[in-house]
Image (cartoon, grey):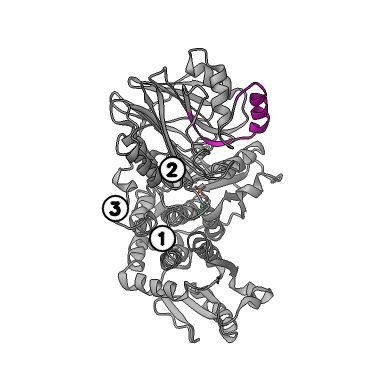
């Protein structure tokens, strides 16, 4: 939802900004723009469309300087166009701003400013900010930004530069913003990967913070004025981890990174001698009567799998709910309810607000998150990091399997701590978890990947797909359908296999590919009957089976994964589903890293 970069130091600001924007393009690619401080104000260059259009514009008309701000946009108010692109400048050209978020009261402010004589250049909500700052400016930029923000309602990561100041002022509420500390230089960005080539010393700004960066360092205050201590932490992500590393897309790279990501998720948490899971959590497992999981999209599907894992291993009732729904009703929680948020970015606003809603009801809070220091991690008592490394591809892949592994760890920990999971059963699941990275390596062997690619290519011209699964793999079907929709734009539906005869089977004809996750051995007989029902209506069944299992029903295609325990099977099955979506998109010439209308990290409602 818009990417933001800022720089002040001795380097060529344009180069730093363009590099940072390239690493943030997953946050939006409707337009890109920069403003670089020059002797006569700002050189502003902006173009609709993806970043290379801005790069060409700069090749023709360079912008040179050592202080600048840059933005890549995911459009909310106002169509993607050159004029709606950020940065926005004040009428006197002295102030330049970039903004991520939504100013909810912008219409009222705009008409008020227009009545006072301000002329607006764009249709965006963001532009009111630059006019407000221009009005409030009396020589102190921090004070002017503070004054302007006092008038707005909504979400923002706001970055402001003034021609008369060799510093940049930034503020955030809801939308993310981090500072990067260098030697004689400072950076800022919406997300850590943008800064990794320059520094790993990161300051995570909190909601309501306002900061000023200059060559000699930074200062942070509360919006009301009190100075704050915000220290830098060293992040352990490497710059290479955020680059494509030779793969054609981040998504494919991240699919192949799953064995390593899972090693990180599990690392140090499986205790060999005792066969226990070690999690550094302060939650008291004995004080939980029920669990509610809140999340969005793929993370929600991880929650659905988690319900099976936790209920089976820890015998605690679990409800799973889409965060955007949860927050607008009156969920019943009490101090013995544990509400778990699952989020890769830790910035998804619906998930964050769902947590706040749960806290108001007195619930205990725990978050399963990838991005260190993100907003959600600061809202909760306990964080279980998944340690999957930066995920750049808009479609979540390695974060999903790492979330599944993390929830399984949690289920084992809860089960053992509450005394409902005996050591032998615990050890069995643990042993399977330990094999996981190896199993995923096997699923990614070239022959298996090639088999999925052939199926994807064969059915890429289909207008629709149906995904079916049972039990713990019913959510796998949902996730397969979501992945396919979002990056190939092929319409897909997903159902628990047993449900099709209650309606969806009417969709089946000889044109329809029906992908059936049929690996859960315990339910294979039942799933076989569902496959027969589809095959009898000439549906094109693509069956995902475990090695060694026989289906005994003629189908259009069979794909195979190594056999594993049922509780672990959604992790293994996720890989062919991701690859199916990826290669369908490839066959249709879609850009898997930049699916239309989508952005990573959804910080607007
Ligand atoms: C789909 C996808 C999204 C996210 C969702 C939640 O591939 O990536 O559905 O899972 O937007 O995002 P996080 O996990 O960052 O809260």
Residue 441 locus on image (x, y percent): 33, 64
Q: Is mark 1 within 8 Å of ligand 1?
A: no
Mark 3 touches mark 2? (CB < 8 Å): no
Q: Nearer the viewer, mark 3 or mark 2?
A: 3
Asked whether 539 or 435 is in front, the reply is 539
Residue contact between numbered discs 1 and 3, judged by CB atoms under 8 Å: no
**Range of magenta residues:** 97-118
Q: Is residue 341 left or right of residue 109?
A: left
Q: Secondary structure at mark 3?
A: loop
Q: Residue furthest right?
A: 330
Quarter of image, res 51: top left
Please say whether residue 234 is visible from this viewpoint: yes
Which residue is the site of mark 2?
371
Q: Report the residue marked by disc 1.
A: 427
Task: Evaluate if marks 2 and 1 touch, with contact meaning CB atoms under 8 Å apart.
Answer: no
Q: Is residue 270 visible?
A: no
Secondary structure type for disc 2: loop
Task: Give the foreground label among 2 and 1.
Answer: 2
Q: Is residue 347 located in the magenta-colored stretch of the structure?
A: no
Does any atom of ligand 1 lie closer than 8 Å to the CB of label 2? yes
In this view of the protein, which residue sits in the foreground, 182 or 163? 163
| Residue in view at x 40 percent, y 46 percent | 53
Query: Which secondary structure, mark 1?
Result: helix
């Amino acid at each position: 939802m818009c990417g933001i970069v800022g720089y002040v130091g001795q380097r060529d600001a344009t180069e730093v900004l363009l590099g940072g924007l390239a690493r943030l393009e997953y946050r939006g690619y409707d337009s890109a723009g920069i403003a670089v401080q020059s002797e006569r104000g700002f050189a502003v260059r902006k173009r609709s469309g993806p970043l290379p259009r801005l790069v060409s514009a700069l090749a023709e008309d360079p912008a040179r300087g050592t202080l600048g701000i840059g933005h890549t946009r995911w459009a909310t108010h106002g169509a993607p166009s050159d004029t709606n692109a950020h940065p926005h400048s004040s009428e006197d050209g002295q102030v330049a701003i970039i903004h991520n978020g939504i100013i909810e009261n912008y219409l009222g402010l705009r008409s008020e400013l227009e009545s006072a004589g301000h002329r607006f250049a764009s249709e965006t909500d963001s532009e009111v900010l630059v006019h407000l700052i221009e009005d409030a400016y009396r020589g102190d930029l921090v004070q002017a930004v503070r004054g302007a923000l006092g008038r707005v309602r909504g979400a923002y990561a706001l970055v402001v530069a003034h021609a008369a100041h060799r510093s940049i002022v930034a503020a955030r509420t809801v939308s993310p913003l981090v500072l990067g500390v260098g030697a004689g230089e400072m950076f800022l960005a919406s997300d850590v990967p943008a800064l990794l080539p320059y520094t790993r010393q990161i300051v995570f700004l909190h909601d309501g913070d306002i900061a000023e960066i200059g060559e000699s360092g930074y200062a942070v205050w509360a919006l009301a004025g009190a100075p704050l201590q915000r220290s830098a932490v060293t992040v352990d992500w490497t710059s290479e981890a955020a680059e494509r590393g030779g793969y054609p897309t981040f998504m494919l790279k991240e699919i192949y990174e799953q064995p390593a990501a899972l090693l990180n998720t599990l690392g140090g948490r499986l205790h060999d001698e005792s066969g226990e899971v070690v999690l550094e959590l302060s939650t008291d497992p004995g004080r939980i009567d029920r669990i509610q999981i809140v999340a969005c999209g793929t993370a929600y599907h991880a929650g659905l799998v988690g319900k099976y894992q936790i209920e089976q291993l820890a015998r605690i009732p679990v409800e799973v709910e889409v965060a955007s729904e949860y927050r607008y009703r009156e969920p019943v929680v009490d101090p013995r309810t544990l509400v778990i948020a699952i989020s890769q970015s830790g910035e998804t606003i619906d998930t964050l607000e769902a947590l706040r809603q749960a806290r108001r009801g007195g619930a205990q809070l725990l978050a399963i998150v990838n991005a260190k220091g993100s907003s959600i991690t600061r809202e909760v008592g306990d964080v279980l990091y998944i340690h999957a490394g930066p995920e750049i591809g808009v479609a979540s892949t390695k974060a999903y399997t790492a979330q599944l592994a993390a929830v399984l760890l949690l289920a084992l920990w809860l089960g053992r701590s509450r005394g409902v999971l005996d050591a032998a059963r615990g050890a069995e699941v643990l042993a399977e978890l330990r094999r996981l990275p190896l199993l995923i390596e096997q699923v990614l062997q070239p022959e298996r990947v090639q088999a999925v690619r052939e199926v994807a290519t064969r059915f890429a011209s289909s207008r629709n797909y149906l995904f079916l699964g049972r039990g713990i793999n019913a959510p796998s079907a949902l996730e397969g359908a979501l992945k396919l929709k979002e990056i190939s734009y092929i319409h897909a539906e997903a159902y628990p296999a047993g449900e099709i005869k209650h309606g969806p089977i009417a969709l089946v004809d000889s044109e329809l590919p029906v992908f059936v996750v049929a690996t859960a051995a315990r339910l294979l007989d039942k799933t076989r009957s569902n496959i027969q029902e589809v095959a009898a209506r000439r549906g094109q069944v693509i069956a995902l089976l475990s090695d060694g299992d026989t289906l005994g029903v003629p189908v259009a295609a069979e794909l195979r994964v190594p056999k594993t325990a049922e509780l672990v099977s959604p992790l293994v099955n996720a890989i062919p589903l991701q690859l199916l979506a990826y290669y369908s998109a490839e066959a249709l010439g879609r850009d898997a890293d930049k699916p239309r209308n989508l952005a990573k990290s959804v910080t607007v409602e």
